[in-house]
Amino acid sequence: MSKIKLALIGSYPPPYGGIAIHIQRLKRQLEEKEYECIVYDLKGQNELIKENIICIKNVKRWLLRYFFFARENIIHYHNSDWKMRVVIGLMGLLGKKTIISIQGASLEDSLKLASWFKKKIIILALKHTSFVIAANKETENLLLSSNIHSQKITVIPAFIPPVIKKEDYQEIPNQMWNFIKVHYPIISANAFKINFYHNQDLYGIDMCIDLCSHLKNTYPQIGFIFCLPNIGDYNYFHKMKHRIIEMGIENNFLFQTKPYQMYPIIIKSDLFVRPTNSDGDAVSLREALYFKIPSIASNIVLRPEGTILFKNRDMNDFTLKVKDALDNYEKYKERLKTVKIEDNSEKILKIYRKVINPKNNEY
C-alpha cells in the first residue's frame, strides 16, 4: 500500500509561533508514522533548505496553480486568512479532501464585520471542507451556529509535546542562561509578534512590564523573559523598551527576539503568564502546564485545567494572582501533579484516517 500524502499549509519555523511549532511537531509525528508530508510555508521567510518544506514567496501565483493541480491525498490548512480558507474549502468542490484548523478568534472576526456575501462564501467553503478542527469550544459553537454539520467538526487543542533536544538548549545564547542564573523568580511569556486586538496590546506586553515593576519591590532580583521572535510593530516595541527604562527594570526585563525554541526557557521558569485579550488554545500555555510550571492567564477564553485565571486586562487582579502563586508556590506546584496535558497528534491522525476512509468509525 502506498503512503498517504499530506499537505500541511501554514507556517514553519523560523520564526517560532504557535502555528509554526504545531506544524513542525505534527510533521515529525507524521514522518515517524511513515506518512509522506509536505509543508507549504506561506510566510515566505524560511530561507533554509529543509526536506519536504516549500517556502512560498508568491502566495497568489502558487495558490492558483495549487487549486487545480494539488496531488496530496489530504490538504490541511492552518493559518487564519479567510480568503485562503475559502479557496481551500472550495477545493472540496473538486473532490479534494481538505481539513481546516481554526485557532483564536479569527473565524469570529472574519464573520463579525463581513458583508452578507462574504459570510455566505466563508460558510459555503467550510461546508465543503471534509473536516474542521476547532481549537476550543467557542469556535465549535460558532461553527454549529453557522450550520456546519456537527459530524464535520471536532475540538482538538493544538498542543503536541516537544522532543527535548540538547541542540535546542545550545542554540539559545549564553546571555539568556546568564540572565536566568542571576535572577529569581523567573517569569516568562511570549508572543509570535506584536499585535493589537480592539486597539489593545493583544499579548499584554504592557501588562508584563507593569507586573515586573510591581513585583520588583518584593523580589528585587526578579527576571522577566518575554519571547518575541518576530517583532512586527517596531514603534510599539521601542515604546515598550523606553517604558522598561522609565520604570527602572532594564536589568530585570529581557526581550528574547531571536527565533529559538521556547520550551527550554519555560522549563527554567518559575512561572509562565499569558495576559492575552483574545486567544485560541495557546500552545505555550499548555506547554508550561505540561512541564508543571504554574501558569497565570487571562479569563478571555476557556483555559486548560490547572491554569490560574485573572480578569482580562485587569492589572490589579493580574498582579494579585501572580503574587499569590509566588507566595504559595509549593501548593500550586503540587496541584499540577494531577493535571494531564494530552499529546493531540494521535487525535489528528484519527481525523486523517477518517477523511481518507469515511466508513472508519475509529473517531
Image (cartoon, rainbow, N blue to C red):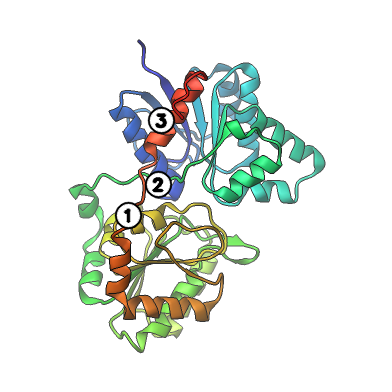
Q: Amino acid at mark 3?
A: Leu
The image shows residue 299 at horizontal and vertical percentages of: 53, 65
* Side of 332 relative to 74 (left or right): left
The image shows residue 159 at horizontal and vertical percentages of: 40, 47
Q: What's the mark number on residue 159?
A: 2
Which mark sits nearer the N-terminus, 3 or 2?
2
* Side of 273 relative to 87 (left or right): left
Quarter of the image holding residue 312? bottom right
Residue labelled with disc 1: 290
At horizontal 26% and vertical 77% (from top left) the residue drawn is: 184
Few, some or many C-alpha atoms within 10 Å of disc 1 (few <14, some 14-19, many ≥20)? Answer: many
Q: Nearer the viewer, residue 248 or 340?
A: 340
Residue labelled with disc 3: 349
At horizontal 70% and vertical 43% (from top left) the residue drawn is: 145
User: For numbered disc 3, what is the local secondary structure?
Assistant: helix
User: For numbered disc 1, what is the local secondary structure?
Assistant: helix
